[in-house]
């Protein structure tokens, strides 16, 4: 990625890296079993069944021309009919190979470790593409299987973060959530008051009011609120959910919600 960036300075390294990983992901996607593969499987079994007992079985590459010639003679309908059952069988066999339970402990342990290494690599690539974080813990499902617990985290300090959570427990999490809500309410209240002051210009108001906004602000100064995003117009300190607070904050920050000072004509009509 850095070499490409040196040749094309306008392309960010992060963007190049993302493209590389996305390309590798697409190239490594598993392909479905095709009809011809199923036909080759069927024909190789049939032809080898004709080999006299005691004679060596024929290899697939030795029969490829013969099988291909027969395949070309079939119509599309005949191809579908001839391979329908074998396709289902091959797909089942592939699925069993991926997720089937192994009966031999040593083979199962080896399969676990190799599969987890592939998962680890895929998670690492996923993080490079998306920035996701991961915590993977794999343990034995039975005492008959012999492998150590497998733990993999991205980022590497996730274990320490989980440890901190376990020590503080739900009480600590709840306390943190309350602090977050309190800070959000404070930030929104300050933002709204600042926006009101900007709208008022040289006219100064002591504080923002909500219950008596119409009487104390609109009737006295001709200022109204446009596009309040919540159902009820009220003080942020009275809002109880983080979702509503974040919506309100975003609405004011993007100027979707704003104060508007009416013209003399508009105020007269009001």
Image (cartoon, helix red, strand yellow):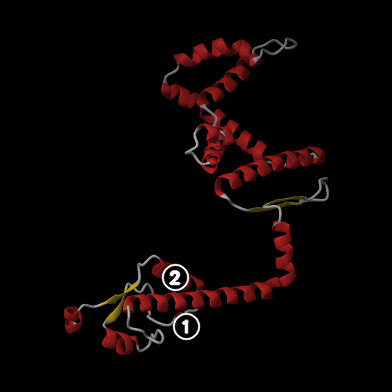
Q: Is residue 184 positioned above or below 104 on the image? A: below
| Nearer to us in this view, 84 or 221 | 221
Q: Secondary structure at mark 1?
A: helix
Q: Is residue 147 positioned above or below 258 on the image? A: above
Please give the count of numbered marks on the rendered protein: 2
Q: Is residue 111 left or right of residue 63?
A: right
Residue 149, percent from left and from top: 78, 50
Residue 218, percent from left and from top: 29, 84
Q: Secondary structure at mark 2?
A: helix
- The residue that appears at 56% across and 45% down in the rendered structure is 129
Residue 4, percent from left and from top: 54, 33
Can residue 231 be seen here? The reply is no
| Nearer to us in this view, 110 or 99 | 110
- The residue that appears at 60% across and 12% down in the rendered structure is 63
Q: Is residue 104 positioned above or below 178 on the image? A: above
Which residue is under mark 2? 249
Q: Mark 2 packing: few (<14 Cα in 10 Å), some, or many (20+)? A: many
Which residue is under mark 1? 238
Q: Mark 1 packing: few (<14 Cα in 10 Å), some, or many (20+)? A: few
- The residue that appears at 59% across and 22% down in the rendered structure is 41
Whether residues under marks 1 and 2 lie with C-beta atoms below 8 angstroms apart, the answer is no
Q: Is residue 68 left or right of residue 197?
A: right
């Amino acid at each position: 990625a850095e070499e490409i960036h040196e040749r094309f300075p306008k392309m960010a390294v992060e963007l190049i890296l993302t493209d590389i990983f996305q390309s590798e992901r697409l190239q490594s996607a598993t392909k479905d079993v095709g009809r011809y593969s199923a036909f080759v499987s069927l024909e190789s079994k049939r032809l080898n069944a004709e080999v006299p007992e005691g004679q060596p079985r024929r290899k697939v590459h030795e029969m490829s021309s013969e099988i291909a010639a027969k395949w070309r003679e079939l119509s599309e309908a005949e191809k579908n009919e001839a391979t329908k059952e074998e396709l289902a069988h091959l797909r089942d066999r592939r699925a069993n190979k991926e997720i089937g339970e192994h009966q031999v402990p040593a083979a199962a342990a080896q399969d676990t470790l190799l599969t987890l290494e592939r998962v680890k690599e895929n998670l690492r690539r996923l993080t490079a593409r998306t920035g996701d974080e991961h915590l993977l813990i794999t343990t034995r499902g039975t005492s008959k299987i012999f492998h150590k617990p497998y733990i993999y985290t991205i980022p590497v300090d996730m274990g320490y973060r989980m440890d901190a959570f376990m020590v503080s427990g739900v009480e600590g999490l709840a306390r943190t959530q309350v602090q977050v809500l309190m800070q959000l309410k404070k930030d929104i209240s300050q933002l709204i008051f600042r926006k009101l002051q900007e709208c008022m210009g040289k006219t100064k108001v002591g504080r923002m009011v909500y219950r008596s906004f119409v009487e104390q602000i609109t009737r006295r100064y001709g200022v109204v609120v446009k596009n309040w995003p919540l159902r009820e117009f009220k003080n942020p300190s009275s809002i109880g959910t983080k979702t509503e607070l974040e919506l309100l904050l975003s609405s004011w920050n993007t100027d979707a919600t704003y104060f508007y000072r009416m013209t003399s004509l508009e105020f007269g009509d009001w």
